[in-house]
Amino acid sequence: MELKDITFVLQECDSSEAYGDRDVLLRVLLNLIGNAIKFAWSGTRIDFEIRKEKDKVCGDTTGWLEVVMSDRCPAIPREYHESIFERYNRGPDRTQKEKAGRGIGFYFCRLAIESHGGTIWFESPIAGKKTGVVVHFTLPTVERVTGAQGEGSQT
Ligand SMILES: Nc1ncnc2c1ncn2[C@@H]1O[C@H](COP(=O)(O)OP(=O)(O)OP(=O)(O)O)[C@@H](O)[C@H]1O
Ligand SMILES: [Mg+2]
């Protein structure tokens, strides 16, 4: 077993509740956090932020939460950015040789997030750096889906 020294940092957390299937969204988080732990270098940190999307000039983007997770690892080369959410796609060969997996996690996450009406994407490397991955996904808030301020089938 490979032991790593990784620090988890919650940068910012908006208190709104996302609307969705708790079990499915938990599996999304497990896949994404599992990826970050698997691919991050030891001695680095994984940062999380939850932002309430601000009103944008175009389109109705109110009532969405954006979850952002970043880790420090070798960058995902640009030629894989389009295809890496496809089933069995693992990007560079080095990951296939060095890290266990089947290339299903991102594929599952995209299906799960899009089935909630959200979007998932990533940037790599981190802006202004040569390494790292930043994964973002959005989910509707409870208020957006139900019009309610309180309890619902929220996660
Ligand atoms: N947080 C991350 N940091 C660096 N690379 C990542 C990260 N998440 C995904 N990747 C890259 O994207 C590829 C696809 O991720 P995905 O989760 O689909 O597959 P996997 O983790 O390799 O296998 P599985 O999820 O089936 O165990 C990974 O193999 C890796 O190259
Ligand atoms: Mg994975």
Image (spheres, grey):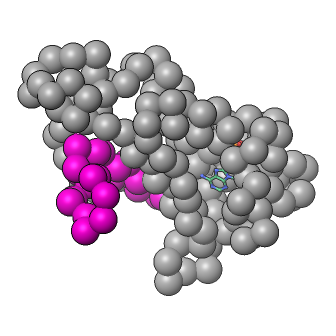
Can residue 37 be seen from the camera position used here? Answer: no
Which quadrant does the C terminus fall into? top left
Residue 117 lies within the magenta run: no
Residue closest to the eye, 95 or 144: 144
Q: Is 29 in front, or is 37?
A: 29
> In the picture shown, does residue 26 fall above or below 119?
above
Q: Which residues are magenta?
A: 45-70
Q: Is residue 75 visible?
A: yes
Q: Quadrant of the N terminus?
A: top right
Does the magenta portion include 46? yes
Residue 113 located left or right of residue 79:
left
Residue at 58% over, 49% down: 36
Q: Quadrant of residue 55?
A: bottom left
Q: Is residue 24 above or below residue 86?
A: above
In the picture, measured across the screen, residue 82 lies left or right of residue 16, that is right
Using the rendered view, name the quadrant where residue 140 is placed: top left
Q: Residue at x 30, y 45 (%)?
A: 65
Residue 2: x %, y % from top left = 72, 42
Q: Looking at the image, which residue is at 31% across and 58% down?
A: 59
Relative image position of residue 85 (x, y in whole percent): 69, 47
Q: Is residue 137 left or right of residue 77?
A: left
Q: Residue furthest front?
A: 59
| Left or right: 87, with 108 as reference point | right
Looking at the image, the residue that sits furthest to the bottom is 128
- State the image coordinates of residue 40 (x, y, percent, origin top left): 61, 56
- In the rendered image, the vertical position of residue 5 relative to residue 140, given as above or below: below
Q: Residue furthest left?
A: 149
Q: Position of residue 66 (x, y in %)?
A: 34, 49
**How many numbered callouts?**
0
